[in-house]
Image: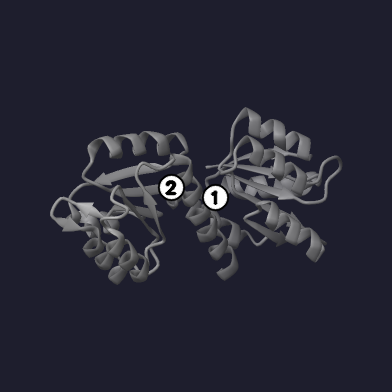
Amino acid sequence: MKILVVDDDRRIVKTTCDILKLKGYESVAAYTGEEALEAVKSAVPDCVLMDIKMPGISGVEAMKKIHETDPAVPVVLISAYATEEVMADARQAGAYAVMNKPMNFQLILSLFSLLRKEESILVVDNDPVFCKTLREILALRGYRVETENTPQKVLDDLEKSYKLVIVLDLRLDDVNGLAVLRQVRAKYPSKPVVLVTGYRHEMSESIEKGLEIGAYTVLYKPFETEELVGLLENIRRMKLQNVLIST
C-alpha cells in the first residue's frame, strides 16, 4: 500500500514515513497541501495522512481538491489543536477521521489493515452478461469482484475471504434470493447485502421482506452503475469510520 504523508513539520513526516516503512508500507512525503495535490495527480495513494493546519492551503481544502481528482481516496486529517468547528467541517467535507497529534499508530495501522481487505465484492447473479459488466466497471474503481451463480456456495465464498458487500439478485433460477439473504444474515448479521432485481412489481413482496430481513437497499435493473458505486463508497466509508471510532 502507498501512503501519502503530508505535514509542514518535516520531522513528523520523516518519523511517520520511517514507521510505515518498517511496517511494510510504501510512503510518499509532502510538506504542503499543494505538494499533496501534485503527488496525488502523479500517483493516487491508498490513503492520505494529512495535517490540517499548514502554510498555503489547509489540509481540509487540500482534501476537497484531492476528492475532486478521486473521491474514493481515504483521507485522515491530523491536528494538534483543531476546534470542534474545524473538525466538523473536515468530516462533512469527507474526512474518514480527524485524529489528534501525536498520532495513534496502532489505530492507523488497524485502518490500513482494513483498507487492504475492504475492496472485494461478491456478486450473486445467474446472468453472465450482468456479472461480466459489473466486474469490469467495478474493477476500474479498484474493487475486486467475485461472482457466484450457485446460491448454495455463497456461504462458502464468504468463509474463504472477506467481502465488503454482497450484491444479490432476488431471482436465481429456482431459488429465491431471500433464502440466500436469510442464510447470510444468520451467519453474518452485519454484512451489507444490496439486493438487485429486474422485476420491481412482480417481486414487490420479496423486496419488502428483504428489507425487513436486513438488506442494505434494493437496486432495480437496469440501474446506473454510478448508483451502485456510490453505495459501495458509502458502505466502505462507514466501515472504516467504525474501526477508527471503536479502536
Q: What's under tag 1, amino acid-wise?
A: Lys
- Residue carrying label 1: 23
Residue at 70% over, 31% down: 38
Q: Is residue 155 left or right of residue 102?
A: left
Q: Between tags 1 and 2, which lies in front? A: 2
Q: Determine whether 41 is above or below 73 in the image.
A: above
Q: Residue furthest left?
A: 174
Q: Earlier in the sequence, mark 1 or mark 2?
A: 1
Observer-nearest of 133 and 104: 133
Q: Secondary structure at mark 1?
A: loop
Q: Is residue 63 left or right of residue 192?
A: right
- The location of residue 161, given as percent across then percent down, is 32, 54
* Residue 143: quarter of image: top left
Task: Give the Cα separation between the discs numbered 1 and 2.
Answer: 21 Å
- Residue carrying label 2: 119
Residue at 71% over, 35% down: 37
Residue 171 in view of the camera: yes
- The location of residue 145, given as percent across then percent down, is 35, 43
Q: Residue furthest top?
A: 42
Q: Are marks 1 and 2 in contact (CB under 8 Å)?
A: no
Residue at 66% over, 53% down: 95
Observer-nearest of 92 and 210: 210
| Rendered image: mark on residue 212 | none
* Residue 156: quarter of image: bottom left
Q: Secondary structure at mark 2?
A: loop
Residue at 79% over, 65% down: 84
Q: What's under tag 2, amino acid-wise?
A: Glu
